[in-house]
Image: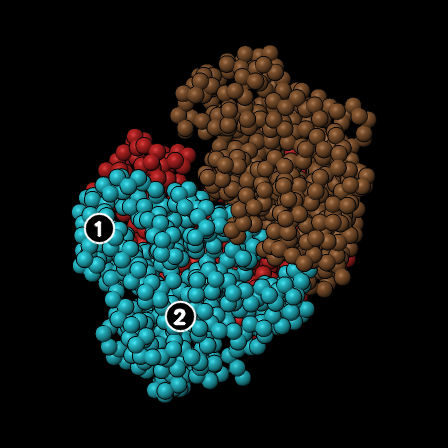
Chain colours: A brown, B cyan, C red
Amino acid sequence: MALLNEDRLFPAEESTRAIARRLYEGIRALPIVSPHGHTQAEWFARNEPFPDPVTLFVHPDHYVFRMLYSQGISLEELEIGHRRIASPRRVWKIFASHYHLFRGTPTRLWLDFAFQELFGLTERLSADTADHYYDVIEARLATPEFLPRALYERFGIEVLSTTDSPLDALADHAAIRESGWKGRILPTFRPDAVVDPEFPDFQDNVRALGALTGEDTTTWRGYLRALEARREFFKGMGATATDHGHPTAQTEDLGDTSAASLFEQVIIGRAYAADLEIFRGQMLTEMARMSLDDGLVMQIHPGSVRNHNAQLFSRYGRDMGADIPQATGYVEALRPLLNRFGNEPGLSIILFTLDETAYSRELAPLAGHYPCLKLGPPWWFHDSPEGMRRFRETVTETAGFYNTVGFNDDTRAFLSIPARHDVARRMDAGFLARLVAEHRIDEDEAVELAQELTVGLVRKAYRL
Amino acid sequence: MALLNEDRLFPAEESTRAIARRLYEGIRALPIVSPHGHTQAEWFARNEPFPDPVTLFVHPDHYVFRMLYSQGISLEELEIGHRRIASPRRVWKIFASHYHLFRGTPTRLWLDFAFQELFGLTERLSADTADHYYDVIEARLATPEFLPRALYERFGIEVLSTTDSPLDALADHAAIRESGWKGRILPTFRPDAVVDPEFPDFQDNVRALGALTGEDTTTWRGYLRALEARREFFKGMGATATDHGHPTAQTEDLGDTSAASLFEQVIIGRAYAADLEIFRGQMLTEMARMSLDDGLVMQIHPGSVRNHNAQLFSRYGRDMGADIPQATGYVEALRPLLNRFGNEPGLSIILFTLDETAYSRELAPLAGHYPCLKLGPPWWFHDSPEGMRRFRETVTETAGFYNTVGFNDDTRAFLSIPARHDVARRMDAGFLARLVAEHRIDEDEAVELAQELTVGLVRKAYRL
Amino acid sequence: MALLNEDRLFPAEESTRAIARRLYEGIRALPIVSPHGHTQAEWFARNEPFPDPVTLFVHPDHYVFRMLYSQGISLEELEIGHRRIASPRRVWKIFASHYHLFRGTPTRLWLDFAFQELFGLTERLSADTADHYYDVIEARLATPEFLPRALYERFGIEVLSTTDSPLDALADHAAIRESGWKGRILPTFRPDAVVDPEFPDFQDNVRALGALTGEDTTTWRGYLRALEARREFFKGMGATATDHGHPTAQTEDLGDTSAASLFEQVIIGRAYAADLEIFRGQMLTEMARMSLDDGLVMQIHPGSVRNHNAQLFSRYGRDMGADIPQATGYVEALRPLLNRFGNEPGLSIILFTLDETAYSRELAPLAGHYPCLKLGPPWWFHDSPEGMRRFRETVTETAGFYNTVGFNDDTRAFLSIPARHDVARRMDAGFLARLVAEHRIDEDEAVELAQELTVGLVRKAYRL
């Protein structure tokens, strides 16, 4: 009995499956390159055991608890937002009893992979097996093999990027470096907190940015210099990329005087709502300009309406599974930035989307033309077998494979990393196998492409 | 020779098809639960024979005559809008001669099913076989086995919901109850005629609503009480759900004073166009509030631009095949209602769409979070094999299966009901078979899911 | 060794592939009907040899050089925009060295077809084989078999339409007629230059239109008469269709007085930007009116944001691979035109889109109702195997096959014509085979449909 089948996710058609198996064999053991995600540097700095199954699998994973919530299980029952979990075994049992809800979802694939590959569990999780699971997982977590650094090595990770506020001193990243441990945990410069005027405590954040850099961030010049200084600091700590999570892909290219005067309104909280969007757009263009100087790769993750559930937000705060995608246009939105820097050979921008309609209509045509643009992998709700298939099917014919950048696991759930990369490798193997089976490429080309999609393109795109 | 193959609609790949066959065998004979559609209670109240093939298959089915119209056949030739059909055999022959137009459409599948399963016809419909078809169908319609109640039983229908105006006295539903016949024909409260100010004769309708309930519907309070009263009446007659066919999914949450003063403008015909949309949006929120009280499930069917063909509308009226979908946003549109009631455990809202781009971008993320939201099956133009496949492929990974509600036939064509449910069962069996063949779920899970998708989820979601 | 496999593009599943092979055998050798494209009448008028591989394969094909550009190869290196190519062999080598970029794209399929079928090349193009390719192609181009007229005949072309400005005297078309050569090279009336006020040199163009026709094109009446005259001239030269490449699908139906006064503002360059869009929309309706009189079929190709890369445009001009699609609505946009002429039996309008979301949501429902509307094949970025599959899968169930019009190659690259039609025939064979394998249509119907999709529907729709 097993949770995982060796042929999972491969196309069922026999000749195609045989090709997929061969392609997958060539990439299954390649190192994991993880250039974008939300794991905590602290784990690797402290290298302490993960406490219990709930803290490991349920609480950090909004994919998990949003599904439970949608079926009427309150966050209270799951003890989410509690300082200490009073009864982790009880919460685990609730989760286990509802494991059927995840049928057909990627969460199920990721969890089963971790259960079997890391914990040796082979019977399906359910109310009946909940206690057995709990005991096995809890016991293993206490062993040295399950400390964060040991797992990093066991997973075959080559590099792992975190996502960090510009106000973060990166003490954990520094501690890791100083520890002599060879793992590469790199920070990523994510300035939303100081460039998005609608971010909680924006003004305080900008003030703190000034304090941290010794710049006068009440002025446009000082503010820009402060950002440049923090980018430089991040770069010194190993960062190769920035990341930008704006509600839209809007960019602007105001003249310097207009930008300065807009900043003055924004920083004192006097700007209109529409101007806040313009300001965010201007800041993307400023970031592109800085990227040209310091060589950091830009990632743009637009289109999420954050905290859609007002009651949940007021009670539990951000990242509670209530962010919902919206329609996102790129063609007009990116024009100001592209008009200014679109043909610069040194610039590299990786675009993401939560709006799949943009793949074939906008993103593939843009990335298939502009030298600075590349397409990030399927993101968030689309980081799934069907989402990956749609991405390849709608993007490849116009942008080719070489304007894409490999896989991102983008996860807060450390133990899901190998599972997620495995899904991506299998789906890529299956997609390439179909192209071979339909005689659209030859198998030797597919072998080469499989390598590129797994390690080659990501190392190059993220300058790793 | 046969019109129907036992393996129709199953994936061609052998191992997947074998699984699909097994799954389908487990659900093919389950009762039909039909919680939303447009059949007439009158048929079952009177239980009189259907008159002729044209009245049965051509005139009530806008899927049929819109295709004929698109290829240059006038509604005049089809005698649509005539009080009595002068020459049904002639109309039938026109239809039969153009049967090739339906190749590749679901209409073809539905009709062939009815032709073979109900009338024993096994040669394809064409100009050559038109008379034979006409004779066979006409003869059978005259037999007791083809009376509405006999067909209801033969089809294995467990419950069949109609869609009714709040002004309807539900006399036919009452007559059915009083007749002692055991068939469950339930009304559905569809208040468009009295909550959409752009509905024909809106003001007269609201006046009639007042007359029917003894409430003063010229006041906001009286108007709301009258609606509550009619909902109560419908519930007493067996209704478990309401249905709302708005042009968009817009909701509003005006304060009571603003709502009352908007109503005053609307009811005297003095509101601006934009305010009419706000009023409709406010009424959705009011309906949600009433649902919390009386437990009726809300269905929202937004996004159809009705009566797009002005000439046709002025000559033939509504529902003439000239309703065209438009892009439909849900994220901002539903926010006011969800902010107010989105976390109420007692509320249940089933969302539909004619804009498939919303499946993966908005609807699955919303339904995979909010406890009150469920996703209705593919609707109207998307109630088709490919439409069902796209629905499952784009919705399941984020919302799972358990945030969906089974199948709706949504038909005006009574004889198409078993055919439509059969298509849905086959497509679900095929989709589940693919998940099994790709080792994404186990077959025992697929067996359980097939039951849920066929009868379990629909009974629960519609509180039947 | 071969570049092409006999089974390419057919579904891998064995029984489906066998059906696809049979269907394809029945259509592979049918004549090529090419009712829309961008080849040059001059080639056939002069019948001179194509000069070299770069001029043949790289420079005219923005699919090719946009991909190279996206990967950092400058247009300068490719000698694009040069009067004479200094070193075609060097440019060819750059292209050959980057041939892997085209893996998974239709460009690869088209090129391999031409390389093998026309030039007998069977080893993959690469840096290593670049010189061999160059030598073989250059040598063959010098032979009589590779003159344009010889190729036209060898390709089995029945008719080939060009796309022409209303200001074009069609001298090349006349020369072909007078030459006695039997090839049918027909002009298409594409009036963008004189109906789109944002087209370069619009006012001069309208003046030239006046000069050409002897009409006073400073007046609305004279302007319309001039357009009618040029349409009549084109029709006399064999044209059966017009073509309209507007940024959106917007139409208008201004009264005559308003239209005349809008024209007066437009023609002196005094209209607001929003009015220019209204003017274009009005001109579509005027064109529909003229089509009713002269019987020319209208093609509408909306939704391309032209010249998105401002730097490239200012240096190299139009059609440099920097046109990007945008979201395109049809339902409200076409309403004014359809309200006026939508039910006219004599009118025929073929709609195209770069926004695939419109297929199932808007275009199929519109074409499945209005007698004047037909759907053009997948266009531009969507003229690809996956694009064709998506088109059939999303359009057929609502609009059927008979509201579509067969294939357009729409190419500037003459040698790609047979390759492109071959891809379309294979994809249609594969799609029909799937319907047969899933028992949704019978094989005799698929045989008939394959003929229709290849030659029947296109001849009828374009009145050829």
Image mark for residue C19: none
The reply to whether residue A432 is visible in this rendering is no
Identify the residue at horizontal 53%, vertical 30% (top origin).
Answer: A338
Cβ–Cβ under 8 Å for marks 1 and 2 = no
- Residue designated by label 1: B222
> In this rendering, is residue A169 above or below B332?
above
Identify the residue at horizontal 48%, vertical 73% (top origin).
Answer: B31
- Element carrying mark 2: strand
Q: Amino acid at mark 2?
A: Leu
Q: Amino acid at mark 1?
A: Gly
Q: Nearer the viewer, mark 1 or mark 2?
A: 1
> In this rendering, is residue B427 above or below A112?
below
Task: List x then y, in percent, for residue C396.
Answer: 48, 62
Task: List x then y, in percent, for residue A417.
Answer: 70, 43
- Element carrying mark 1: helix
- Mark 1 belongs to chain: B
Question: Quarter of the image containing the N terminus of chain B?
Answer: bottom right
Distance from the alpha carbon under mark 1 to that under mark 2: 32 Å
Image mark for residue B160: 2
Identify the residue at horizontal 76%, vertical 61% (top origin).
Answer: A1
Identify the residue at horizontal 29%, vertical 46% (top origin).
Answer: B279
**Is there one chain holding both mark 1 and mark 2?**
yes
Question: Quarter of the image containing the C terminus of chain B?
Answer: bottom left
Looking at the image, tell me whether mark 1 or mark 2 is earlier in sequence order: 2
